[in-house]
Amino acid sequence: MTDRTILPAEPPAPSTGAPGVTAVIVTFRSAREIGRCLAALRASEMPVSVVVIDNASGDGSADEAEAAGRGMDLRVVRNDANTGFAKAVNQGIELVTTDLVLVLNPDCYVRPDTIGRVVHEMAQRARIGMAGCLLLNPDGTEQAGCRRYVPTPWRSLVRVLRLHHLAHVHPRFNGFLMNNEPLPKDPITLEAISGAFMLLRREALADVGLLDEGYFMHCEDLDWCMRFRERSWRILFVPGTSAEHDKGRSSNARPLRVEWYKHRGMVRFYLKFFRRRYPGVLLWAVIASVWSRFALVAARIVFRRAVAALRRRKSCPPKTSQPAR
């Protein structure tokens, strides 16, 4: 069932922790982004505590976080290895004592009113387990994945086969992205939001549980959305405030590995939630299309690397041997 309910104000849910918000940020080679991220949190109209978990970045991300966060209520944890996004987020949440937890990407930059506005809308309604805001690309356009339907096997197949262009003919051909749909004027419940900005109620976390650490990176946010809704917690989208998300900056250096984890996460997600809900033929067709897509993406990455290496070789002048004296 599609969840797109506009919500009036309701009695707020009871608090289970200390008042306030703590942001949990996982860094991996994020030295260029974390300073701006923390500066935006410092400028927030609502005070925010911060926990940074550095996954053995090796580029000074942890040092940059400590320098940029000087004077803030900040704790930086330096991991000895890259434990993956889900495990690092869970590690950070375990250190939080406030009743609200904000899972925030280091390349996501909130506006001064963003957190306060989302907290306010969340506090007006019961059974809101998580909430997100409008995420914008650096050019000001709405980011794909900011608000979305759950990518069921059918919706994923529709997107892979590009049948979503037929959505005007029949809603059955809707994909799972919503950024081309009109932006609602009021807060609305959705099936899923982006993991770049997720404001979570600790009461809901205690009921649903932490992120599934079987995902190294990617799709763990969708998994969380599914589990929250399975436990009857609603997911709120607040369109009246925004944050900029410079998506994937820290992933650009290792695109092949990132794509591997992304596609492996997709398969885990489909098998975990839809193995018994969809005909086996459709489910395995979708999984086959996932790995076929990975093969094409990987081939494109390898080809581009080879072309770039060849160009570099041609641009370097050949070494000439010095004549013997």
Image: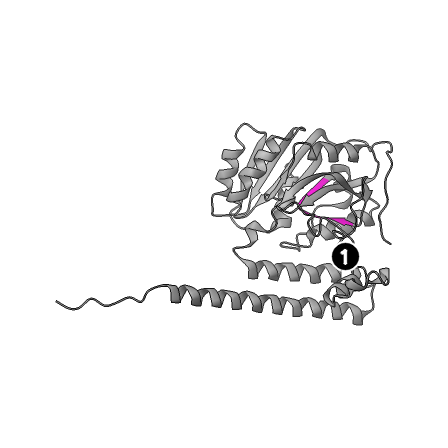
Q: Residue at x 66, y 67 (%)?
A: 293
Q: Which image quadrant for residue 273?
A: bottom right
Residue 80 place in picture, x, y as percent: 51, 47
- The secondary structure that dominates the magenta segment is strand
Q: Is residue 172 magenta?
A: no
Quadrant location of the N terminus in the rendered image: bottom right
Quadrant location of the C terminus in the rendered image: bottom left
Residue position for label 1: 176
Q: Is residue 182 visible?
A: yes
Residue 90 place in picture, x, y as percent: 65, 44
Q: Residue at x 77, y 67 (%)?
A: 283
Looking at the rendered structure, the secondary structure element under dot 1 is: loop
Q: Is residue 97 visible?
A: no
**Position of residue 274 in the picture relative to residue 95 (left or right):** right
Q: Which image quadrant for residue 157?
A: bottom right
Colouring scheme applied when the structure was drawn: one colour
Residue 228 place in picture, x, y as percent: 78, 47
Q: Residue at x 57, y 34 (%)?
A: 39
Position of residue 23 relative to residue 229, above or below, is above
Position of residue 69 relative to residue 58, above or below, is above
Front position in the image: 256 or 43: 43
Amino acid at pointer 1: Phe
Position of residue 208 relative to residue 322, above or below, is above
Front position in the image: 44 or 74: 44
> In the image as oriented, which residue stretches furthest toward the left?
325
Magenta-tinted stretch: 192-199
